[in-house]
Image: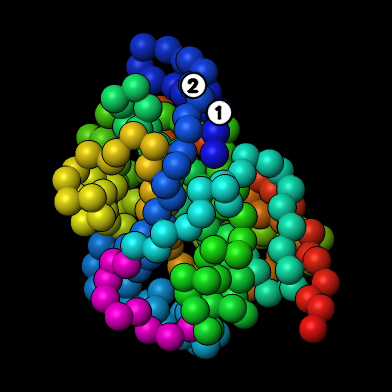
Amino acid sequence: MKLFFKADSQTGSRNIDVEISSLVVAGWAGRDQHAIEHHIEELFAIGVPRPSSVPLYYRVAENQLTQASHIQAVGDQSSGEVETFVFRSGGELYVSIASDHTDRKLETYSVALSKQVCAKPVAAEAWLYADVAEYWDELVIRSYIQENGEKVLYQEGTLASLRPPLELISGFAGQAELPEGTAMICGTVGAIGGIRPAPSFTMELFDPRRGRTLSHSYDIEVLPEVA
């Protein structure tokens, strides 16, 4: 799957295209046990079994990645999750954002399958990881959903609550360097008011030191669930 980004760094901006051949979703990626347990209980409340270990690395088909502003999902029980998205291009590690859109009904049966059946929207902008690595924990991820005709804050938290990307990469690849062609979705924060579906989803990664934001929005079209 080829993705296109406007990549910003301290030396300027440039357009890059990246061929992704392997997609990894890091689940249960909270940095402290309390945060992990909160998310486990949040999902357990809607019927999702507890994980066998943490973190877990789910493999998802790379053709589920999309930078479109519209996706389709079977049934009305899917929802998004804002997460950082890291990839390597030209020997450099970059960070963007993605939504680990997941079928919550199927998730009660199989977390791995629930992630596979939904598209994974990705922003069209990225930052050089080296430019934000020093203050990574200060970055803020947040998301909004449309609810009762209004834009509602759905998730918000600093990356200090999640395992840093190099740690997750090392846990998966055995080294702190992500292979070229591999992308990783790096974990999320809890939903405000509980996990629930919505017709649209907006996600952001905010850099408080430089006052800049990566963002992406998409709509969800519900397809009929036919028996």
In the image, is residue 98 above or below residue 41? Answer: above
In the image, is residue 151 above or below residue 21? Answer: below
Q: Earlier in the sequence, mark 2 or mark 1?
A: 1
In the image, is residue 119 above or below residue 66? Answer: below
Residue under numbered circle 2: 16
What element does badge 1 sit on? strand
Amino acid type for the residue under numbered disc 1: Phe
Q: Nearer the viewer, residue 5 or 8?
A: 5
Magenta segment: does it hold 220? no
Give x and y (percent) for residue 80.
59, 60
Q: Nearer the viewer, residue 72 or 124?
A: 72
Res. 151 in view:
no
Res. 70 in view:
yes
Region rendered in magenta: 48-56
Quadrant position of residue 114: bottom right
Taking the spot 71% from the left edge, 52% from the top edge, the residue there is 71
Say which quadrant the N terminus sits in.
top right
Give x and y (percent) for residue 111.
47, 74
Badge 2 vs badge 1, beta-carbon distance below 8 Å: yes
Say which quadrant the C terminus sits in.
bottom right
Taking the spot 79% from the left edge, 59% from the top edge, the residue there is 221
Q: Return the residue found at the far top.
A: 11
What element does badge 2 sit on? strand
Which colour scheme appears in the figure?
Answer: rainbow
Residue under numbered circle 1: 4
Magenta segment: does it hold 52? yes
Taking the spot 49% from the left edge, 21% from the top edge, the residue there is 16
Amino acid type for the residue under numbered disc 2: Ile
Label disc, if present, on residue 121 of the rendered structure: none
Taking the spot 69% from the left edge, 48% from the top edge, the residue there is 218
Identify the main secondary structure in magenta: loop
